[in-house]
Image (spheres, rainbow, N blue to C red):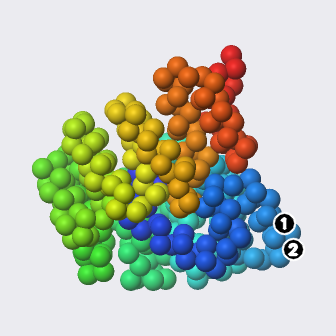
Amino acid sequence: MMFGLRKLLSVAVLTAAAFHSSLAASDPTAGKLLAEGRVDDAILLLRGRINGAPNDAQSFSLLCRAYFMLGEWNPGITACEKAVSVDPDNIEYHSWLGRIYGEKADHSSFITAARLAGKVRNEFETAVRLDPNSVDARADLADFYLEAPGIVGGGKGKAEAQAQKIAALDPAQAHRVKARMAEEEKDYVTAEKEYRIAIQLSGGKAGTWLNLARFYRHVGRWNEMEDAIRHATAPEMNRPDLLMGAAEMLINAKRDLPDATELLRRYLSSNATVEDAPVFKAQYLLGTILEREGDKQAAAEQYRAALSLAKNFSPARDALNRLKQ
């Protein structure tokens, strides 16, 4: 299926950082652990809190996000559903529940994904109803409408209606949605134009450049992808969370691995790690590069470092087991 967060990352790079910062401020201990990638410690802390306060909606929401980082959709969904049941008027809780439903859908059979699609739509529509002026909520909903088939509530017309609503709130985000619409229809000339308008209207923000890079990767324009990545990751952009996303794009495209290595090391050595770019995932990605380069010992060290923060992070665990064989 095609309506999980994997397809909605272009929304996340534009909007998620502010949300995480505000939540971390309201809960500095758990928020700090998640920002540092110490997901095992965060889960232990949050479960202890929930044992003492079984109706602590914020702890359930944070627990959901911790499991989201690990790709453990089922316990994450349980935690998110509990947060929503305790505080049904919280837009952020509905948004996260919709996102984790979407991720499970992306990793499920067609039948399961189709069943979950209605839940994704309901959560995103509820978030918009709770706060019609939320750009994040409308962007999530627009991408759902764009990606989901009509039989489960998707539709280009619905996505376009959301883009029109977003235009009054955040013109750059509206053009990103329009770019995605054109991209889905394989109108790549219009898509590129819309992505560049989004860059211009945003004042050249790093996230809009990374969205353009993703587009270039999709259409196989590798040199232009790398140029957009350089814009997105320039030091003056000051978006540490995007360093890992840019590095992962280069790794998946098998392009400029030395630059990907530099971006990951730059992120890991910074004092500005964020939940959106888990440290353990950055370590795992660095390990994959080192493994490709034949340095199995250094790769194993990175995989072990990742597992020291997130013992159930299966990509690192599987990679380490592969090296042992």
Of 57 and 29, nearer the camera is 29
Callout 2 crowding tier (Cα within 10 Å): few <14, some 14–19, many ≥20: few
Q: Is residue 312 left or right of residue 246?
A: right
State the residue position of label 1. 48
* Residue 242 seen from this side: yes
Residue 35 at x, y percent in the picture? 60, 61
Callout 1 crowding tier (Cα within 10 Å): few <14, some 14–19, many ≥20: few
Q: Are marks 2 and 1 in contact (CB under 8 Å)?
A: yes
Disc ID at residue 52? 2
Give the amino acid type for the residue marked by disc 1 in the picture.
Gly
Give SS at disc 2: helix
Quarter of the image for residue 263 reads top left
Q: Residue furthest top?
A: 325
Give the amino acid type for the residue marked by disc 2 in the picture.
Gly
Give the total number of marks visible in the rendering. Answer: 2
Of 313 and 270, nearer the camera is 270
Residue 318 at x, y percent in the picture? 65, 30
Of 189 and 263, nearer the camera is 263
Residue 316 at x, y percent in the picture? 63, 36
* Residue 178 seen from this side: no
Q: Which residue is drawn at the image coordinates 69% and 36% (left, top)?
A: 304
Q: Whole-Å distance between the Cαs marked 2 and 1?
A: 7 Å
Q: Is residue 172 above or below residue 155?
A: below
Q: Which residue is drawn at the image coordinates 63% and 58% (left, top)?
A: 36
Q: Is residue 166 above or below residue 67?
A: below
Q: Is residue 269 left or right of residue 325?
A: left
Q: Residue furthest right?
A: 52
Q: Which residue is drawn at the image coordinates 24% and 70% (left, top)?
A: 203
